[in-house]
Amino acid sequence: MPKYQFFQQTGESSAVRYLCTDAPHFLSTKEQLLAQGYEVIGDMIHARNESEAIAHFKSGMTYPAEEYGKAHMVVGLYYFIESLLEKTMELVRRKSQNTQASGK
């Protein structure tokens, strides 16, 4: 799973950048950001894609705690069930939309 690293420019809360560590230019781009006054924010985020990484980042950095919790069986079971319910609801919504679009 790809890892993403987030950077924030010193003194500016709105200037946030991120890089995928799998990118061939990761190290050179990271050096450029650091030279421009950016600092690394938090730990690297493991995510399937950029959108997921951004969502984890915007979640208030609770992502590392969630990942740690998933390592414990009971908490992992909770997140598994939560994810299963989310996917099921998504499928139901899609089916409902397709049914409505095709005229029932």
Image: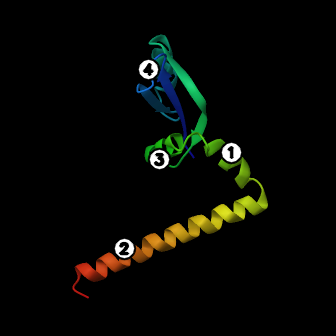
Could you tell me which residue is drawn at 44 percent across and 12 percent down? 36
Place of residue 74 in the rendered image (x, y in percent of width and height, measured from the top left): 76, 63
Depth check: 75 or 30 in front? 75
Instruction: Give me the C-alpha separation between circle 3 and circle 2.
Output: 22 Å
Left or right of 96, for residue 23: right
Marks 3,2: beta carbons within 8 A: no
Could you tell me which residue is drawn at 47 percent across and 31 percent down? 19
Closer to the eye: label 1 or 4: 4
- In terms of secondary structure, where does tag 4 sit? loop
Q: Amino acid at mark 4?
A: Glu
Q: Amino acid at mark 1?
A: Ala
Residue pointed to by mark 4: 12
Could you tell me which residue is drawn at 44 percent across and 20 percent down? 12
Q: Residues within 10 Å of mark 2 (few under 14, many from 20)?
A: few
Closer to the eye: label 2 or 4: 4
Count of numbered marks = 4
Residue pointed to by mark 2: 94
Could you tell me which residue is drawn at 48 percent across and 11 percent down? 35
Place of residue 26 in the rendered image (x, y in percent of width and height, measured from the top left): 49, 26
Q: Residues within 10 Å of mark 1 (few under 14, many from 20)?
A: few
Farthest residue in the bottom direction?
104
Q: In the rendered structure, which disc, 3 or 1, sits on the residue that comes first in sequence?
A: 3
Depth check: 3 or 85 in front? 85
Marks 3,1: beta carbons within 8 A: no
Q: In the rendered structure, which disc, 4 or 3, sits on the residue that comes first in sequence?
A: 4
Q: In the rendered structure, which disc, 1 or 2, sits on the residue that comes first in sequence?
A: 1
Marks 1,4: beta carbons within 8 A: no
Q: In the rendered structure, which disc, 3 or 2, sits on the residue that comes first in sequence?
A: 3
Instruction: Give me the C-alpha separation between circle 1 and circle 4.
Output: 26 Å
